[in-house]
Amino acid sequence: MENTITVAIAGLGNRGRWTYAELLRRCREMNARVVAVADPVADRRAEAAAAFGLPESACWADAADLLAGPRLADVLFVCTQDRQHTAHALAGLAKGYHLLLEKPVSPFLADCRAIAAAAHAAGRQVAVCHVLRYTPFFGYIHDVIASGRIGEVVSIQQIENVAYWHQAHSFVRGNWRRQDETSPMILQKSCHDMDILLWLAGRHCRRVSSFGSLRHFRPAHAPAGSAARCSDCTVRESCPYDAYTIYLTGEKTGILAGNDDWPCNVLAQHPTEATVRAAIETGPYGRCVYHCDNDVVDHQVVNLELDDGVTVSFTMCGFTSAHGRTVKVMGTRGDIWGDIEQNLIRVNEFGKPEQVVDVTALAEDLSGHGGGDRRLLADFLNSVRQGKASGLLTGIDASLESHYVALAAEHSRLHGGACVELDTFVRAAQP
């Protein structure tokens, strides 16, 4: 097929395999073909080889080995663990790959800057997977602000509802539970939010302050009768974090409720009642949430002062029944309220009737981060095909400020909420 983009994928987890690679497989109009993969799990490599018709010679156990040889594709999807991104991204750029780089770019500010510098030096495009900019939900809000209907933006409030079971899955039992192994939670989970808030405001950040802690998921809060694993617990029937409930019977999350996607596919490559139950009884996702080795926060607030005195208040919390984001944008002539999970936006111009927007009427496909995954991937592939990155909403330069803000927020949190001047903070980390 003419102008087909070839793709190598480093990391075949939920994002690399079941989001981006699966979109390429299902959406023929993207006109892209997977030609090489790398992942340490043999079953993942074998399944990807079967799905994409790859020979064994095109499958590596280590992304470093894939990148050690000649360039195999037009683009490289870097979907490995947070602290592996820098080495894989820099090696990929040196080989001449364009990059689709899963967030966060890196937990280290100097490494973020080094990747941007390498991309410019190599003349390669790097799209960071800040998919919220591509959602019809946030796109509509951005367009209303740009139209001037609510005047000049004065203040924005946003809440990220992590959901109690998601907090337990990803940040207590799961891959992102420890900051020294991955990233601070405000970066790993909420660089999305820092990015979208800056984009909506259309301003740069001047100052940051933050408070938060790991309050609940500690041994001191374990109920009497609890055990190291849910399988041995005498009080699990009354515990909302019981692994059997979350992964087996949970209405939205359990395999017995028909959910064989995330989060169950993290426990087992092909989730069934038997494989999920076995994973609970033998693996990390069956551990008691009060007896894990986690250290990332379970709640955090961040305050931003932007150019022109615009203020932003952000809250991330793991103690919510629902997940998703709510946002309120307040301007000199009106305000906007939105809930991305309800797919609902309300626009109020002062003195005029309220406009209620059903986001489901704006686009047909809202799957995958509110429709953002598919639109991001299509935009990146088209920019590579056309040889220009000018239209990318989430190119490396546009995306890095969110990382600077998140890392400055974490610095503030660890230093008693001290106000951090962003320019000074960034200059101190010159590569």
Image (spheres, helix red, strand yellow):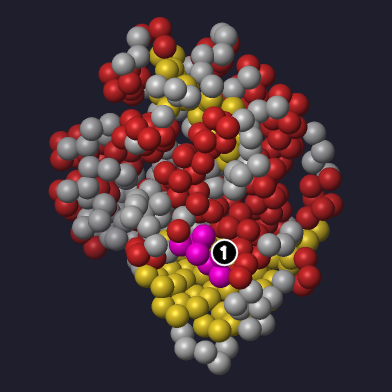
Depicted 321 relative to depicted 89: above or below:
below
- From the image, give the main secondary structure of the stretch colored magenta: helix
Instruction: Determine which quarter of the picture holds residue 125.
Output: top right
Depicted 375 relative to depicted 271: above or below:
below
| Residue 403: percent from left, percent from top | 65, 48
Residue sitting at 78 percent across and 61 percent down? 206
| Residue 248: percent from left, percent from top | 20, 48
Which residue, given by chain and number where applicable, does mark 1 sit on?
A: 142
Q: Can the viewer see residue 212 in this picture?
A: no
Residue sitting at 67 percent across and 47 percent down? 398
Amino acid, disc 1: His
Residue sitting at 79 percent across and 47 percent down? 426
Residue sitting at 34 percent across and 52 percent down? 365
Quadrant position of the C terminus in the picture: top right
| Residue 193: percent from left, percent from top | 56, 57
Depicted 207 relative to depicted 12: above or below:
below
What element does badge 1 sit on?
A: helix
Chain part drawn in magenta: 137-144
Q: Nearer the viewer, residue 258 or 390?
A: 390
In the image, 399: left or right of 376?
right
Q: Residue furthest front?
A: 2
Q: Which of 410 and 202 is in front in this view?
A: 202
| Residue 138 belongs to magenta span | yes
Instruction: Determine which quarter of the picture holds residue 269.
Output: top left
Q: Nearer the viewer, residue 238 or 427?
A: 427
